[in-house]
Image: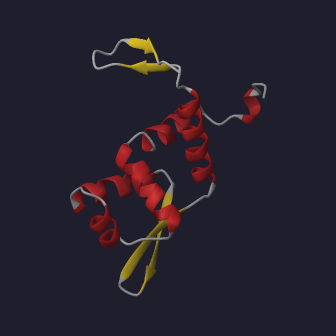
């Protein structure tokens, strides 16, 4: 794929998307709701973090149009807004798996993994 400036979005918008995806807990939330839409209560029963922390992560994902909420009676269900986000997460996991050559030890120094 070649770089074509007219087709790419603004770098700051991409930066915001990657920042929103840059949290372990947000990725976990996305993996859970990829299975089926969930409520905040559902998520708080699955994740080992405070409900208020889950709410903060949901807010970041919602502001960045990664998730949306729909009401079913008194319950708000959280779902992924665009399935391309899942494709991006799958691609990221594949890239990370392929990056097995380098590993960072506890002191932040890179070393080669033994294959």
Residue name at image x 37 percent, y 44 percent: 24
Task: Between residue 56 and residue 113, name the one nearer to us.
Answer: 113
**How far from the left and from the top, in percent, is residue 18?**
49, 38
- Residue at image coords 58%, 52%: 86
**Residue occupying image coordinates x 78% and y 25%:** 2
Q: How is the image coloured?
A: secondary structure
**Location of residue 102 in the rendering, given as x and y in whole percent from the top left corner:** 48, 18
- Percent across and percent down for residue 16 are 48, 39
Q: How many marks?
A: 0
Against 108, is 9 above or below?
below
In the depicted structure, whether residue 92 falls above or below residue 58: above
Residue 88 versus residue 73 in the image, above or below: above
In this view, 98 is above or below 105: below
Foreground residue, 13 or 95?
95
Residue placed most toward the observer, 96 or 75 = 96
User: Position of 25 compared to 102: left or right?
Assistant: left
* Res. 42 image quadrant: bottom left
- Name of the residue lying farthest toward the bottom: 73
Q: In this view, does 48 lie to the left or right of 39?
A: left
> Residue 85 vs residue 44: left or right?
right
Residue sitting at the far front: 115
Q: Quadrant of residue 98?
A: top right
Image quarter where the N terminus lies is: top right
**Is residue 43 toward the left or the right of residue 92 in the image?**
left
**Residue drawn at (28%, 68%) of the image:** 45
């Amino acid at each position: 794929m070649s770089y074509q400036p007219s087709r790419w979005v603004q770098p700051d918008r991409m930066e915001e998307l990657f920042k929103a995806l840059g949290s372990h807990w947000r990725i976990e939330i996305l993996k859970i709701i990829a299975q089926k839409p969930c409520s905040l209560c559902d998520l708080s029963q699955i994740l080992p973090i405070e409900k208020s922390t889950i709410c903060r992560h949901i807010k970041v994902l919602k502001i960045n149009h990664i998730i949306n909420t729909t009401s079913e009676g008194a319950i708000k269900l959280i779902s992924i807004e665009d399935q391309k986000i899942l494709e991006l997460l799958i691609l990221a996991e594949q890239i990370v798996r392929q990056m097995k050559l380098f590993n960072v030890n506890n002191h932040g120094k890179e070393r080669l993994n033994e294959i």
